[in-house]
Image: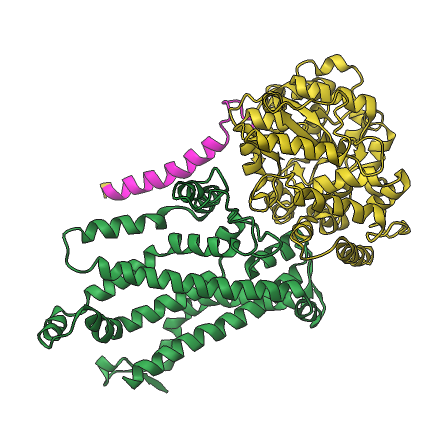
């Protein structure tokens, strides 16, 4: 009898305890809410600043991050975003299959109110605002811009090898590049370190060179012709594209890249540079933060690869770091508040220091705001302000078209030609234009 | 109608209805975890599906696309080479180690522990560790080769001629432990009297292994070979972790191509068709292996 009473008591107490627990957030009766936000490891420190402020201003709300790799953002994330357990804020890059499919199926909530509240149209500038608003739809915010296609160099190795660094950051000609490479190798170091197996680093170089081989009209056509409404006026078998590919093969044949480049991924390439074993590394504006993250104190400067027909080579511009709100988000209103806070001047500037050099999504004309970025990044920003940047082809076209690394690997190994790659890409372009 | 129960209870007859009822929960579970995904994959392979939402029936289009895709046949060739080489390597090393660790020596249990250690290492960690180890100049393998005067600048993963073989080597390193334990267990169960009789008859070590050990462990050995073929045919982690299918597609095996087609290109219909075709091939391979072994055993 006593045992039966005890069992009944436990049976009643357990559910009661559960009910009380669920109502006991701080004893105020508030229900705890978790806002789930996707991000990547580079942006995380900046997002953490926003989360701290957001939690302070919204008692009872906890911000939880899902930190994704670039691979996850562009592949398996589609299943996460369309599931019933979707995050409140999604990180689906503009040029990824995930973004394309979600957009086509109306799986993102319109956030015109966020744009209006944060005045994003004018703070981005019309050109950028329109570029990230497919068919005029405001479905994402660009939280950070990226400058890539930058050949970072190790100042100490260059000094040791007796290499004169060009004041304008331009290597200028292939002969100059070969001379630099020869001196670096003679000093006992690897030359330009890239992630040859990462499936995007060769394409970065292609982006970089293509912008120097095309007229602005040609480049615009290459970057927009996947859209059926845009007539194709530039074929991938045309000289600007094939010359850019041939230049990469020339660089490979001349030993510009590190030994074993095709078997090294981006992490290994970064580690090689950070360990002081490579004189140069292909990277972006946050590469100094990446090197620092490897506990390295390499003093870095930046250079640009020789152009093909233009006078100078510019950094490539990537405006694909979009954040969206999936239709399955559980807290869309809170998500909008978070995005507005993230895009505030205060948070955009604070992120520069927190991330070690991330560039704000919005346009910041006051250069003093970048004072807390690493010196090398500040110089890069100044260069960008003076000489401008070029649209990165692969950062704007669908991933199916822009993932050219496997083809470039075949090219450098002599298993295909630049013309054949052009034919293959033209066929893919046609397929995409027909809805494939 | 009734069913005859197991041979031990030859006189006991159980009504078929009861047998079906008793088997129902298991059948239900099998249907949920086995039949349903297979049926759905088959359905997907005849459809256009972008990763979510409804599927659109496209008939044989995906199969036609896949069979006209040069990359599919390159990946198939790589898969067959990888699966066969890795299976041969794994089974041969497991057998060798099992024989070495079952001789009744003092250190047998220590050997078993040591040789099992690679099985504890997660696949991704093994992939990262070995891909660093085989890098030119800095990798430990090249350093050792350099020390031996054989050159330290071999780009093992950077060359299409060697990359797949490096991965085969890593697969052998990571996957030998379980077959080793299974085979060691099978050898342990061979009655020692057989070896004693063989020794009295003058059989040496190799003859004992060839004419007694091998035939007696054949059922386990066959199972190990079949499982390794299946697992290596479906390998993904080590290949993706070490080369992502490169350089120039030289290590792109079917699971890697399937992943790229589905998740990278958003074409899940073609990916499913590739999956179905490779499953058919795998079932054929497995059946041939098991039947071959069964007929050999029956002939002895």
In the image, is residue A185 part of the stretch drawn in magenta? no
Image quadrant holding the C terminus of chain B, namely bottom left
From this viewpoint, is residue B39 visible? no
Query: Considering depth in this image, is B84 or B153 the residue closer to the camera?
Result: B153
Magenta range: A3-31
Question: Residue lying farthest left?
Answer: B200
Query: Considering depth in this image, is A388 or A436 the residue closer to the camera?
Result: A388
Q: Which chain is green?
A: B
Place residue B259 in its image quadrant: bottom right
Residue at 44%, 63% in the rendered image: B85
Q: Tell me the chief SS of the magenta region.
A: helix
Q: Give the percent coordinates (x, y) of residue A357.
A: 66, 23
B145 on left or right of A172: left
Residue at 73%, 14% in the rendered image: A369
B242 on left or right of A102: left
Image quadrant holding the N terminus of chain B, namely bottom left
In the image, is residue A13 part of the stretch drawn in magenta? yes
Q: Give the percent coordinates (x, y) of residue A237.
A: 82, 53
Query: Considering depth in this image, is B201 or B47 the residue closer to the camera?
Result: B201
B86 on left or right of B71: left
Question: Residue lying farthest bottom?
Answer: B1
């Amino acid at each position: 009898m006593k045992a039966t009473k005890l069992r009944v008591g436990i049976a009643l107490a357990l559910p009661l305890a559960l009910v009380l627990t669920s109502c006991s957030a701080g004893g105020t009766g508030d229900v705890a809410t978790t806002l789930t936000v996707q991000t990547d490891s580079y942006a995380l420190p900046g997002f953490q600043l926003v989360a701290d402020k957001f939690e302070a201003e919204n008692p009872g709300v906890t911000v939880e991050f899902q930190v994704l790799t670039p691979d996850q953002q562009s592949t398996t994330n589609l299943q996460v975003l369309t599931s019933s357990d979707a995050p409140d804020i999604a990180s689906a890059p503009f040029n990824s299959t995930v973004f394309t499919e979600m957009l086509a199926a109306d799986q993102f909530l319109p956030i015109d109110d966020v744009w209006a509240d944060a005045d994003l149209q004018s703070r981005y500038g019309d050109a950028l605002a329109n570029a990230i608003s497919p068919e005029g739809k405001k479905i994402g915010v660009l939280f950070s811009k990226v400058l890539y296609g930058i050949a970072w160099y190790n100042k100490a190795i260059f000094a040791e090898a007796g290499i004169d660094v060009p004041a304008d950051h331009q290597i200028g000609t292939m002969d100059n590049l070969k001379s630099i490479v020869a001196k670096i190798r003679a000093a006992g170091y690897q030359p330009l370190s890239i992630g040859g197996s990462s499936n995007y680093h060769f394409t970065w170089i292609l982006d970089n060179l293509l912008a120097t081989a095309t007229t602005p009209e040609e480049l615009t056509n290459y970057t927009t012709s996947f859209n059926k409404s845009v007539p194709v006026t530039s074929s991938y078998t045309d000289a600007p594209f094939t010359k850019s590919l041939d230049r990469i093969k020339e660089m490979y044949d001349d030993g510009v890249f590190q030994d074993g480049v095709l078997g090294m991924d981006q992490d290994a390439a970064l580690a090689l540079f950070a360990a002081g074993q490579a004189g140069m590394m292909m990277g972006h504006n946050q590469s100094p933060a990446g090197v620092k993250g490897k506990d390295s104190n390499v003093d870095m400067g930046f250079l640009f690869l020789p152009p093909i027909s233009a006078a100078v080579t510019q950094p490539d511009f990537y405006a694909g770091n979009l954040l969206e709100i999936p239709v399955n988000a559980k807290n869309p209103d809170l998500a909008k508040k978070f995005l507005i806070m993230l895009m505030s001047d205060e948070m955009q500037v604070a992120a520069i220091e927190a991330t070690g050099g991330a560039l704000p999504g919005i346009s910041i004309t006051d250069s003093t705001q970048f004072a807390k970025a690493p010196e090398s990044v500040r110089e890069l920003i100044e260069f960008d302000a003076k000489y401008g940047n070029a649209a990165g082809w692969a950062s704007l076209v669908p991933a199916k078209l822009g993932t050219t690394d496997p083809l470039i690997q075949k090219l450098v190994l002599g298993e295909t030609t630049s013309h054949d790659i052009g034919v293959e890409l033209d066929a893919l372009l046609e397929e995409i234009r027909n809805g494939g | 109608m009734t069913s005859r129960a197991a041979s031990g209870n030859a006189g006991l007859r159980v009504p078929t209805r009861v047998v079906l009822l008793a088997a129902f929960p298991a059948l239900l579970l099998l249907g949920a975890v086995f039949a349903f995904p297979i049926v759905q994959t088959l359905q997907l392979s005849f459809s256009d599906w972008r990763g979510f939402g409804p599927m659109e029936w496209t008939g044989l289009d995906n199969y036609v696309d896949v069979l006209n895709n040069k990359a599919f046949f390159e990946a198939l060739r790589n898969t067959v080479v990888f699966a066969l080489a890795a299976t041969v390597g794994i089974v041969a090393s497991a057998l060798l180690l099992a024989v070495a660790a079952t001789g009744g020596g003092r250190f047998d249990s220590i050997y078993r522990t040591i040789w099992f250690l690679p099985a504890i290492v997660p696949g991704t960690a093994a992939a990262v560790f070995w891909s660093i180890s085989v890098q030119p100049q800095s990798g430990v393998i090249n350093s050792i080769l350099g020390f031996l005067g054989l050159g330290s600048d071999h780009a093992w993963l950077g060359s299409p001629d060697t990359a797949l073989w490096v991965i085969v080597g890593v697969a052998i390193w990571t996957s030998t432990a379980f077959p080793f334990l299974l085979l060691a267990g099978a050898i342990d169960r061979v009655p020692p009297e057989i070896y004693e009789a063989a020794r009295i008859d003058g059989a040496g070590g190799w003859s004992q292994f060839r004419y007694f050990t091998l035939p007696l462990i054949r059922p386990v050995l066959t199972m190990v070979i079949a499982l390794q073929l299946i697992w290596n045919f479906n390998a993904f982690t080590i290949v993706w972790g070490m080369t992502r299918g490169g350089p120039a597609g030289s290590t792109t095996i079917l699971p890697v191509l399937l992943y790229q087609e589905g998740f990278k290109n958003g074409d899940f219909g073609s990916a499913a068709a590739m999956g179905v075709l490779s499953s058919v091939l795998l079932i054929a391979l497995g059946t041939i292996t098991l039947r071959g072994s069964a007929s050999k055993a029956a002939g002895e």
